């Protein structure tokens, strides 16, 4: 408890100091940026970033409704501020605050996307636009004179953000839900089953998997043993037509063997009959090879 109070007190002092930091005039800001960029003056960097921490706090406050600690948002915004200072080009005659705003916001948004849910989402520009604007647009549309149906609201939001209505519906459902651990008990009573206990896997059981692997190995051995009843030409045709991934055409094999494609078909048919007879002789249960 004392540690929490100390942390809150420290944050309040930090915020108060940042809000009381003196504003920089344009020429002073430009001079500090030049000193840092050209001379690597760390003191100039400190003064430049300290004067803009109020900007970090103001931007972080816009995202506090996502439920993440304000201190974390400010910290991530500070990372964005330092990134802006590292990339800023004073010779372009642009105010540092204007340039830094983009980096601060981007850093905070990236932190929110990585930590808002245990399920990572919002990786594309479309998903990011939906994630950060859906609630705002819903609230705006909800303030209308008459209640709007859900599908109608989704249609308006999709048009405003230039995304599909399906994307809007999926993101809306995601923002309306919450993370639930599979290890969480179904009931609050002690000894209650966990959610994962009710998940059904469609995969075969381990003993079924092992049994199928053993059967497949046996079938493969019997097949290669049966192939020994074929002569060289029959074996080549069966292998290239039936046992290769590409599967050679009758025309291609005919050209390679110097015979017509009809003759290749006849040889293949005869070879398959011989192969079937050899397999049935070794294993009378024909279902093993269907």
Image (tube, rainbow, N blue to C red):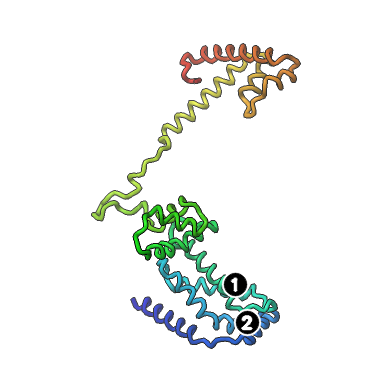
Residue at x-position 61% and y-position 13%: 269
Q: Secondary structure at mark 1?
A: helix
From the top left corner, tell me how far across and down residue 211 is, in percent.
Answer: 45, 29
Image position, residue 53 (x, y; %):
52, 79
Query: Eyeballing the image, is 217 above or below 102?
Result: above
Q: Which residue is mark 1?
A: 83
Left or right position of 57 against 269: left
How far apart marks 2 and 1 lie (CA) works out to: 14 Å
Within 10 Å of the Cα at label 1, are there few (<14), some (14-19), or many (20+) other Cα atoms? some
**Element marked by disc 2:** helix
Picture layout, residue 33 above or below residue 187: below
> 66 and 188: which one is in front?
66
Q: Which residue is mark 2?
A: 42
Which is nearer the eye, 60 or 126?
126
Q: Is residue 253 left or right of residue 11?
A: right
Q: Position of residue 149 (x, y in %)?
A: 36, 55
- Tell which of 68 and 272 is nearer to you: 68
User: Residue drawn 39% across and 78% down?
Assistant: 8
């Amino acid at each position: 408890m004392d540690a929490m109070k100390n942390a809150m007190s420290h944050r309040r002092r930090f915020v108060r100091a940042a809000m009381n930091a003196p504003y920089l005039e344009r020429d002073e800001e430009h001079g500090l940026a030049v000193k840092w960029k050209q001379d690597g003056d760390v003191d100039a960097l400190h003064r430049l970033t300290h004067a803009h921490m109020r900007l970090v706090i103001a931007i972080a406050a816009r995202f506090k409704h996502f439920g993440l600690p304000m201190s974390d948002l400010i910290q991530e915004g500070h990372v964005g501020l330092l990134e802006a200072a590292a990339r800023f080009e004073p010779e372009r005659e642009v105010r540092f605050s204007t340039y830094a705003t983009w980096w601060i916001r981007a850093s905070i948004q990236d932190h929110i996307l990585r930590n808002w849910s245990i399920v990572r989402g919002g990786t594309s520009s479309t998903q990011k636009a939906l994630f950060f604007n859906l609630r705002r647009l819903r609230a705006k549309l909800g303030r209308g004179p008459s209640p709007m149906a859900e599908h109608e609201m989704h249609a308006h939001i999709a048009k405003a953000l230039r995304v599909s209505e399906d994307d809007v519906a999926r993101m809306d459902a995601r923002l309306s839900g919450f993370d639930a651990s599979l290890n969480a008990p179904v009931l609050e009573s002690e000894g209650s089953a966990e959610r994962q206990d009710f998940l059904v896997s469609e995969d075969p059981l381990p003993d079924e998997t092992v049994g199928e692997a053993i059967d497949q190995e046996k079938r493969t051995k019997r097949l290669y043993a049966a192939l020994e009843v074929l002569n060289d030409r029959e074996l080549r045709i069966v292998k290239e037509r039936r046992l290769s991934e590409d599967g050679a055409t009758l025309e291609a094999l005919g050209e390679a063997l110097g015979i017509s494609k009809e003759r290749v078909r006849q040889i293949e048919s005869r070879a398959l009959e011989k192969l079937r007879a050899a397999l049935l002789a070794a294993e009378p249960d024909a279902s093993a090879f269907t």
